[in-house]
Image: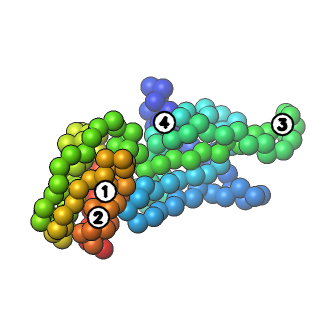
Amino acid sequence: TIDNLDGLGAVDYSAAVCSGQGAAALKIMRTLNAPSRCSGMLDVADAGLAVPARRARAVVTPDNGVVLFTGSLATEPEQVYAGMSTAGAAYRVAFNAVSDEWLLDRQAYLLKGVALAQAGGEVLASMTQRGAPGVLGTTGIARSQVVGVFEPAQSATWSENAGTLAAAGYAAYRAVEGAIHLATA
């Protein structure tokens, strides 16, 4: 589903997902302790749907209901020429979405303080709530191992700092369904 933030809510774009004939179906790319990305091609004209807007909220869920990806379209979708149809030139829409921590990366805030001998999960929850309270939930954060010393880098984004912290605690973080999850690796 995609919510274009136009007041219509989440709209099912399943019928517009292109696959075959050189177009890849949805692709979700995950990297340990970094934002996930989702990309794909849509044929919105044939499906009678609006072109997704920049910053639209995307949720990928198969028929079994498991949420595979949640995030936002970080860039303007790109019109890609697909050939000629009986009505004239046909275009598909290529989109790229970044997982929910993109919202935290966009916040203008300073990460302050040094964590000494604290559980990585506690530090991550504190860093999330102090930097952008209420943007993403922290109930999915496990305690994880104790991190000796952690000082967030002022020039780094939230996700870069979170990745460094998770790795220091031998854990992995992920943002999905509006919450941060941390588990030991």
Where in the figure is residue 139, as x and y percent of width and height? 20, 53
Disc 2: CA contacts within 10 A as few (<14), some (14-19) or many (>=20): many
Q: Is residue 175 visible?
A: no
Seen from the viewer's position, the closer of residues 166 and 54 is: 166
Whether residue 144 is situated above or below residue 113 in the rendered picture: below
- Secondary structure of the residue carrying numbered label 4: loop
The residue shown at (65%, 49%) is 41
Q: Are marks 4 and 3 in contact (CB under 8 Å)?
A: no
Quadrant in which the C terminus is drawn: bottom left
Query: Looking at the rendering, which quadrant does residue 42 occupy?
Result: top right
Amino acid identity at mark 2: Ala
Give the foreground label among 2 and 4: 2
| The disc label shown at residue 166, or none | 2
* Mark-to-mark CA distance, 2 and 1: 6 Å
The residue shown at (41%, 59%) is 34
* Residue located beneath label 1 in the image: 162
Of pointers 2 and 4, the one earlier in the residue sequence: 4
* Residue located beneath label 4 in the image: 55
Q: Is residue 93 left or right of residue 149?
A: right
